[in-house]
Amino acid sequence: MLVKVVVSLLAVCLAVSSTVLVGAPVDADINSPETKEALRFAVAQYNADSDSVYTSEVVKVIKAQVQVVSGLKYIFTVQMARTSCKKEEPESTCTVNSDPAIAQQHECKLAVLSQPWMHSMMLIENNC
């Protein structure tokens, strides 16, 4: 009898642990246009809110996830670094600053809420 109970509990635990929770974040396709647009928006907002004189850019995407909420919540964990472009300069192609003291690479978690039917995008998390 005890063996049947243990086997049954083990089967239930394995079944529950192997399923994905509905509404939980899942890995996003970083190459999809929607994910790229959300990341571009997140970086632009990060730069606008930053106190730095220089703009920053993504050096590496560590993790990209999407979650269905009251829209789509894109969650990015990225490696950021300051570029050689200053904020007040016109938009141009910027590269990571060659001076490590200025570049200051750091990891950030950025989250964007996208509600396309409302033409709305909002940076809801900025942990750098």
Image (cartoon, rainbow, N blue to C red):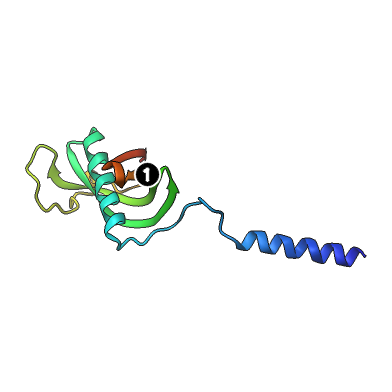
Residue closer to the observer: 40 or 128: 40
- Quadrant assignment for the N terminus: bottom right
Residue projecting furthest to the left: 90
Q: Looking at numbered disc 1 in the image, what kind of residue is underneath it?
A: Ala
Please provide percent x and percent y for residue 86. Answer: 13, 41
Please provide percent x and percent y for residue 71. Answer: 38, 45
Q: In this view, does 76 lie above or below 11?
A: above
Look at 74% across and 65% down and name the residue there.
11
Residue projecting furthest to the front: 117
Look at 32% across and 39% down and name the residue there.
123
Please provide percent x and percent y for residue 80. Answer: 29, 49
Look at 7% across and 41% down and name the residue there.
89
Q: Quadrant of residue 3?
A: bottom right
On the picture, is 86 further left or further right than 22? left
Q: In this view, does 95 lie above or below 102?
A: below
Residue closer to the observer: 47 or 118: 118
Please provide percent x and percent y for residue 88. Answer: 10, 37
Count of all numbered marks drawn on residues in the image: 1
- Quadrant assignment for the C terminus: top left
Residue closer to the observer: 27 or 105: 27
Q: Is residue 89 above or below residue 35?
A: above
On the picture, is 53 further left or further right than 19? left
Q: Mark 1 points at which residue?
A: 111
Look at 61% across and 63% down and name the residue there.
18
Q: Is residue 75 above or below residue 60?
A: above
